[in-house]
Amino acid sequence: MRTQAADKYWWLIFGCGLLPLLALFADIAADNLGGNPIQAIHIRLGDWTLRFLCLTLAVTPLQTVSRWRGMSGYRQLLGLYTWFYATLHVLAYVVADQGLQWRAIVVDIYQSPYIWFGVLAYMIVLALGLTTSNWAKRRLGKNWKKLHRLIYPAGIAAVIHYFWQLKGNLAMPVFYAIVIVALLGFRLLVWFKNRHLNRLLIPLGRKTGSG
């Protein structure tokens, strides 16, 4: 059951999640996006997609360390914000950058392999966003967890997409890559511990009991 404190934090996170978009609107209104505003919009929305994706992935490690199960509701919200900013990122490309010229979009995707990774990442995030509800969780059953583990391949594909398209400073994609690999490594360590180390304790316990 969610407490009043949990509800307060939920609404706080919900409000904070809109701040990057409001800041972007303010910069657009003030003409503060540099010499290539469309590219700036595109990159900023992509950055926030990756940031919310990393925050979504960070919930499970934080929940494991803190043992506070109430964080699962925040993971859902952060995941929806990942979907939201990813959709805005795609719309910025399709509408603002390409002007809904679908033939040009298809040619650009064909000629730019880095976009393939972006499309892959978005299709996964879209599938996760569409199945985030409790109804979808009940309908999918055990397959729901399998589907939502694809968030890690989505993160890797998004980092490759980001890294490949840049020709200058690569500090940010490298940073996101380190964060995602670290979070994935934590998940793998927990899995290894639960799957293997617990098995090793069973014979030890039986031996102690018989002595």
Image: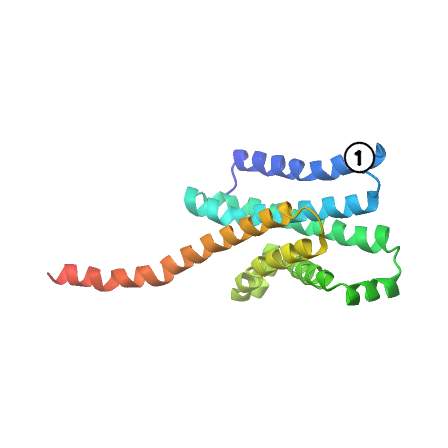
- At horizontal 58% and vertical 52% (from top left) the residue drawn is 177
**Residue 99 location (% of width, % of height):** 89, 55
Residue beneath the point at 43% across and 42% down: 66
Residue wearing tag 1: 27
Query: How many marks on residues?
Result: 1
- Which residue is more in the foreground, 80 or 118? 118
Mark 1: give few (<14), some (14-19) or many (20+) Cα within 10 Å: some
**Residue 161 visible somewhere in the drawing:** yes
Instruction: Please report the residue visible at 36 percent of the width from the left and 57 percent of the height from the top.
Output: 193
At label 1, which amino acid type do we have?
Asp
Report x, y in % for residue 173: 63, 50
- In the image, farthest residue toward the top: 30
Residue furthest front in the image? 168
Judge whether residue 76 can be spotted in this image: no
Say which residue appears at 85% left-offset and 50% top-offset.
96
Q: Position of residue 123 (x, y in %)?
A: 69, 62
Assign a secondary structure to mark 1.
helix
Residue 206 in the image: x percent, y percent? Answer: 19, 63
